[in-house]
Amino acid sequence: MDKYESRSAVTGMGMSEVGRRLMRDPLALTFDACLAAIEDAGLTREDIDGVCTYPGTVGGAPGISGAAAWDVMDALRLDVKFFNSGLEQAGQLGSIAAAMLAVSAGLCRHVLCFRTVWEATYTQLQRTGKVRYSGGGGRMGGDQQWRIPYGAASAANWIALYCSRYMHEYGLTREQLGQIALNGRRNAALTDYAIYTEPMTLEDYLGARIVSTPFGLYDCDVPCDASVAFIISHIDTVKDSRRGTGVGFEAVGTGNHERVSWDQGDIRYEPGLLGAAQMMWSRTDLRHEDIDMLQLYDGFSFNALCWLERLGFCAEGEAGDFLEGGARIARDGELPLNTNGGQLSAGRLHGYGFLHEACVQLLGEAGARQLPNQPQTAIATSGGGVPGSAFLLRKL
């Protein structure tokens, strides 16, 4: 198969300061990450001829949208041939797929991709009256008109309903589900930028306040302030990059086989994952036994469970048994999961953190949390709503 995936690679990565209520301008965080990624690739600003991001600032919720593509293009004085941003993509990493397609089509050679969040600071500013959300007014429309009357304003409410149905159908217990959070916390203890690093026991997990049944506090990711950036380069340029190597794309899944709805599909699972998983596997000869680690979106613990099954690492309804005791997903287990702590403990880097962790592990640059057996392959996913994306990565 002549695949667009084989024509590009990650040659540079950058991450800003990560923290709660940093009280820094999100554009400043964005610059830190972008300039670090450009330097990491061994490039200059003059080499960057493309920019992609998610979701930009148009239509994005405050705190979720840190900077637009044109903000960065203007402030860094970039002369680009292609740029892209928007909310309606295949998950947050859909912006990476857009960059890969642009490189594959010959539109550009080096695309700067970034994702910035400042939820923790924005919430603090809102609480202290220093900013106000200027939402519309009048009668509410769209999906929310059916949710707000019941107080179900958050994805925590909607995904908790899926989890409750799944538990009813398959007998999943909170003790089994909690292994995702416990595993993440153990891994976060080795991650220098993680938000939550203190030890957590199963009793701590079960004893935490309920947010939306059956989700407790530690089933929910940690809002933070941060920016993550990548350089997606044409494969022919990798040998001239700073490392002389990079991370390659084996297969990407951006398909959607389900209704784009929170309540009109298979309500046992988070929607928007199945098409991405099936498409990814259809574009590679690699199989499940060839995968060395998983970096699965965990906006809520149940998100990661859904990915485990939709990707086929366990059969329908068997994720609870797969997670039992946590040994199989541990750093020294058969399928290490979310080795930086994931969004549940390391912080809500909103999809980009999973690709970042996959890349540093594949390059052997993860420091104290580096997996003991140097991994050669990884899967990173994004989404958290509808639809998602799945990336199968390999060490070059």
Image: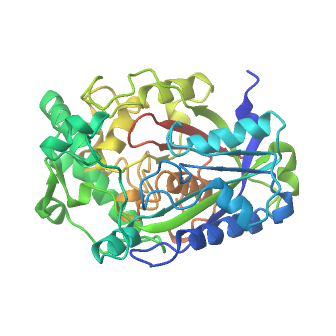
Instruction: Classify residue 261 as left or right of residue 22.
Output: left
Instruction: Classify residue 352 as left or right of residue 204.
Output: right
Question: Residue at 25% across / 40% down in the picture?
Answer: 139
Work out whether residue 321 or residue 159 is closer to the camera in this orientation and state it.
Answer: 159
For residue 311, what is the image quadrant?
Answer: top left
Judge whether 251 appears above or below 173 on screen: above
Question: Residue at 21% across / 60% down in the picture?
Answer: 217
Question: Residue at 39% across / 76% down in the picture?
Answer: 21
Work out whether residue 343 or residue 341 is closer to the camera in this orientation and state it.
Answer: 343
Judge whether 6 appears above or below 200 on screen: above
Image color mode: rainbow
Work out whether residue 109 or residue 127 is closer to the camera in this orientation and state it.
Answer: 127
Residue 226 place in picture, x, y as percent: 50, 67
Residue 289 appears anywhere in the view: yes
Residue 347 place in picture, x, y as percent: 41, 64
Residue 1 place in picture, x, y as percent: 73, 21
Residue 197 appears anywhere in the view: no
